[in-house]
Amino acid sequence: MAATAAPAPGSADSAVVVRLEGIAKRFPGVVANRDVSLEVRRGEVHAVVGENGAGKSTLMKILYGMQKPDEGAITVDGREVHFRSPADAIEAGIGMVHQHFMLADNLTVLENVILGAEPTRLGWLDTRRARERISTLSAQYGLGVDPGALVEDLGVGDRQRVEILKVLYRGARVLILDEPTAVLVPQEVDELFASLAELRAEGVAIVFISHKLDEVLRVADAITVLRGGTTVATVSPHGTTARELAELMVGSELPTPDTRDSTVTDVVELSVEHLTVLSPEGRALVDDVSLSVHRGEVLGIAGVEGNGQAELVEALLGLRAGTGVVRLGEQDISSWPTQRRREGGIGYIPEDRHRQGLLLSESLWENRVLGHQTVRPWRRGPWIDRKAARADTERIVREYGVRTPGVDVPAFALSGGNQQKLVVGREMSGSPRLLVASHPTRGVDVGAQATIWDLLRQARADGLAVLLVSADLEELIGLSDRLVVMLRGRLVAEMSPDDTTPEMLGSAMTGAFAAPERTA
Amino acid sequence: MTTTVEAPPGGAPERTSRVAAPLGRRVLLAVAAPLAAAVFALLVSSVALLASGNPPLEVYSKMLTDGTQLRSVLITINNAVPLYLAGVAVAIGFRMALFNIGVEGQYALAALLAASVGAAVQLPGALHIGLVLLVAIAVGASWAGVAAVLKVTRGVSEVISTILLNVIAAGIAAFLLAEHLQKRVEGSNNSATPPLPESARFPNLNGLLDGLGITAPQGTNLGGFVLVAIVVGVLYWVLVNRSLFGFEMKAVGINPFAARASGVHTKRTTVITLLLSGGVAGLVGLAQVLGTSYSYGLSFTAGLGFTGIGVALLGRNSPIGIAFAALLFAFLERSSSTLQFIDVPTEIYVIMQGAIVLSVVVAYEAVRRIAATQAERAVRHATEEIAA
């Protein structure tokens, strides 16, 4: 078996399975990849990191045969290969597990795995042989998947293992995992990493694409950093910190989200008392939550996703029914519909801008109006004043640094970071009193992230009350004046960002760490 | 495709060409779609004609020469009016991704009840017509309202409910006509509502034509209801392009989650939209009731609601586009009757209608994708320039 320790990067090694050399790929107007070199060895987890737009997806598409490189060579087991399609890549032993699973819910694991590669015997489906093969693979790699189970009954982690099994079944010896942990909760991440260790021990090479640097450091044997379409470094995780990696990705000193002086006032802008939100089955998604946010204060809500943060936010916006009292300033807004709450001064940065924040096919100015369609200057009685809307959109583009050739461009044409800047600009316009920000920098590049942090800080200094929900612990600690931890629908701990480390916050989120009991 | 030169990244910036190119392309794209669709539709129709043993070119030229005569033009316009209204009724639903297939039932019930009420009362001219219009709008809207209520309270898809309501409407109309509202026409099997009095009849526009120096041929006229269609078209344009409600409608249609998060009352918007759609649908049969037959009977024109779906698709939900689509459909229908004289089967016009709708839908989708790619590229160029 191949050694599990990482060989020193760059050393000539006969265990190299895949070698990319001098890969370049140009699209009209942009160079997605140039001079990319990558070596992946047997029994190695090789992480590929880089910010959005650094060329990770293009590189993986090239490796998986979905795109043809303009220059450079791919060698597998020392032989040069030219993939015309993913089928060729699979033939050469390279398989990919996409971020979004491609499974048929109403079929069994067995049926899903053999779909498209069905073993036959005299023209009939040979399920017996397939079942044996799947059981063998599952045992060999420690995947623990029951071939007879219905996929719809499986959890996310199991589904992911089915996807991996699907690829292994087709004979893959190189596995590309595209952001595999994005959809997993921490325990599932641990299980995935255990599976990866088994695969590695069996000599499978794994290309692991991720944003999450702490995970990369945990699981990888070698890390290649992409920046601006090219490979800038391959490092060993030993003796490398997340911060150093991030700096390699950005190519400069990292911006930090540290909030400087406190601007907290004693005016309560939002107060929530005994808010409870039930699921249709009667389970408490938000369980008796009470909190308050002052003018000029950022209240950070930490928690593993799925612990009621999304439901809390939706209840505050009036998108979800709940019991309890919500006050904005002095007013009880508990019974107000969403529109009235927004008119009353609640800005909302949704966690998924594509789902809740934008009309992707429509122009930027129409997206600027969205959510504020009932207020001046563009609303004149029953009409919308397009000129006023355009003018204000141009202001946002200018002030918030949205990179776009104009305000008539459809929203989908912008990059994620620029879409988010538009959303942030929109929600901070019209002097809101309270900003509910869910994952405000999710999926945006580091530059846009720094801009958004600055904007939030500026707004806070101007007296805005901010409720910040985030999965980025550094962001939470850096921006918040106060932190509360949400676990299974309840607020279980309150912490001060001054003496809290991401590690402490992380353990409080899982309930493992006995944080000081919450008093307020 | 155009051959605009793409400046290499980091190369000499050619600002003028970069800024001008997308505009030129946009114009080209706008023209390309209908042109490609027309060519494809003509091809399909030609194949159908050849298969039925008719020389396509001869048929087309016959259609053109007959169709451009004044008599045909007037008939085409008159026939286009109800198609236009049906098209707008469907398009209002399409704006927020609602599929009102029930225009058919909405206009049948509306025409029957409006004709009955119109015949039962005596009022001075304008008021009388106004009342009939109002009844038709109210009946059409109420019938669509049933589907709206089912949708927002019980989650019943409007596609299903409006189809079923069509069947119920046909039954109710037949029942009411047979049992309560009919007046037997002497010496005929046709049963119909009593005829409208003079005061409820919509004047034709032949006087206006005379003023323009055009004399309508004997036995033809330009129906006055075309004015109603124009008013509806203008109101529709204003609603969609300028009003707050039109914006909210569109938002719900494109992304209901974002619309809700933005404070749009999605249920209320759904109900109002279906009521508007049904109200316009109620007017579809009135061109005939007020302008030609003056009653609702067994021989009343059916099927306009379904044709309206094709008209709305062809017109791309735009007020002007729907007008062209309605005129084109009416022209084809008119042609089919003249084609009979040269022994071309009348069904050929149905094939043409289908071919046109299909090719337009495909062509516009293709153009939409090309335009989307170009928009992304344009943004990328602009962004690079800013970054540089």
Image: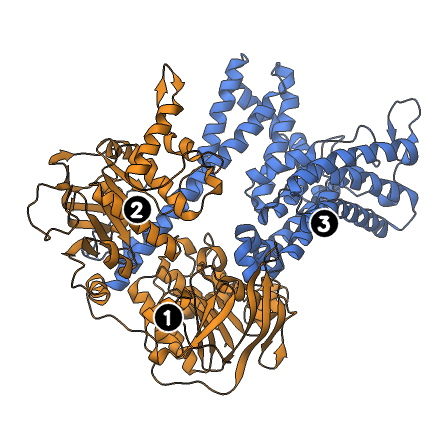
* Disc 2: which residue: A195
Q: Is residue B219 above or below residue B276?
A: above
- Three-letter residue code for mark 1: Leu
Task: Specify whether A17 is left or right of A295.
Answer: left
Q: Residues within 10 Å of mark 3 (few under 14, many from 20)?
A: some
Locate residue B71, reporting x and y percent: 68, 30
Tell me which residue sits at (70%, 31%) in the image. Answer: B303
Residue A33 visible in the shown view? yes
Give amino acid for label 2.
Ser
Q: Quadrant of the C terminus of chain B?
A: bottom left
Q: Position of residue B365 (x, y in %)?
A: 46, 39
Q: Which mark is on residue A505? A: 1
**Tell me, what hue is chain B?**
blue
- Numbered disc in front, either 3 or 1: 1
Residue at the limit of the structure toward the bottom, as seen here: A266
- Residue located 34% across and 56% down the image: B379
Chain ID at mark 2: A
User: CB under 8 Å between callouts 3 and 2?
Assistant: no
Please report, as a chain letter, where disc 3 is located: B
